[in-house]
Amino acid sequence: MKIRVKELREGFNPYKVERKGSIGDPPEFADLSGDLVIEKCGTTLRVKGSLNFTALQDCSRCLNDFECSVSQPLELFYRTGKLEDSLVGKEAELTSDDLNVIAYKGNELDIWPDIREAMMLAMPMKPLCSEDCRGICPTCGKDLNIGECRCGQGSMDPRWEGLLNLSEKKPVSKKKK
Ligand SMILES: [Zn+2]
Ligand SMILES: [Zn+2]
């Protein structure tokens, strides 16, 4: 996913991103596509657009694999030469935008690592296969989306019920004494 910097015009350059099939080992993503625009202004490049891809995830509740389609806006800034050089004498003008500038050298710029990073950042910390995923039973490990297990169902083991009654009554009886 390389940009030939010298072939870019000043101003706007359309740039298509496409990667079919699974991405990563083990696969984390699949079928990436995106319509980007590279805006060249002197030594600065701004890559903007949105990425569409399939994310292959593990649900944080039920641990099952699932796929979801993701649409993620993308904006990257690049500057020729070393980052330090390009910022020399400009420290006073530093804005928050400048902090995202990624320096590149030479004629070819590989934007794949940055695209990949943007894809990773688009992923939730705790992915869910669905909003109302019921997860797995903490006691027996059964996937509760498939069906109920016997652990949590209504009637409690009578021995535990007895203990619960005791602990509920104790504080009350103490106060009375
Ligand atoms: Zn789930
Ligand atoms: Zn259970």
Image (cartoon, helix red, strand yellow):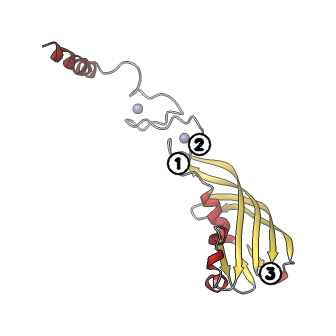
Amino acid type at mark 2: Cys
User: Looking at the rendering, which quadrant does residue 98 occupy?
Assistant: bottom right
- Local packing at callout 3 (Cα closer than 10 Å; few below 14, some 14-19, many 20+) is few
User: Looking at the rendering, which quadrant does residue 102 occupy?
Assistant: bottom right
Amino acid type at mark 1: Lys
Height in image: 153 above or below 60? Answer: above
Location of the N terminus by quadrant is: bottom right
Height in image: 70 above or below 17? Answer: above
Question: Which residue occupies 72% across, 79% down?
Answer: 109
Q: Position of residue 8 (x, y in %)?
A: 84, 78
- Local packing at callout 1 (Cα closer than 10 Å; few below 14, some 14-19, many 20+) is few
Tell me, for residue 42, which label it has, or none.
Answer: 3
Tell me, for residue 126, which label it has, or none.
Answer: 1
Q: How many marks?
A: 3
Q: SS of the residue at dot 2?
A: loop
Question: Which residue occupies 26% across, 21% down?
Answer: 164
Location of the C terminus by quadrant is: top left
- Pointer 2 residue: 129
User: Looking at the rendering, which quadrant does residue 87 occupy?
Assistant: bottom right
Amino acid type at mark 3: Gly
Rendered-image quarter of ligand 1? top right
Task: Please tell me which of labels 3 and 2 falls first in the chain.
Answer: 3
Q: SS of the residue at dot 1?
A: loop
Tell whether 52 sits left or right of 95.
right
* Distance from mark 2 CB to nearest ligand 1 atom below 8 Å: yes
How far apart are the alpha carbons under marks 3 and 2?
45 Å
How far apart are the alpha carbons under marks 1 and 2?
10 Å
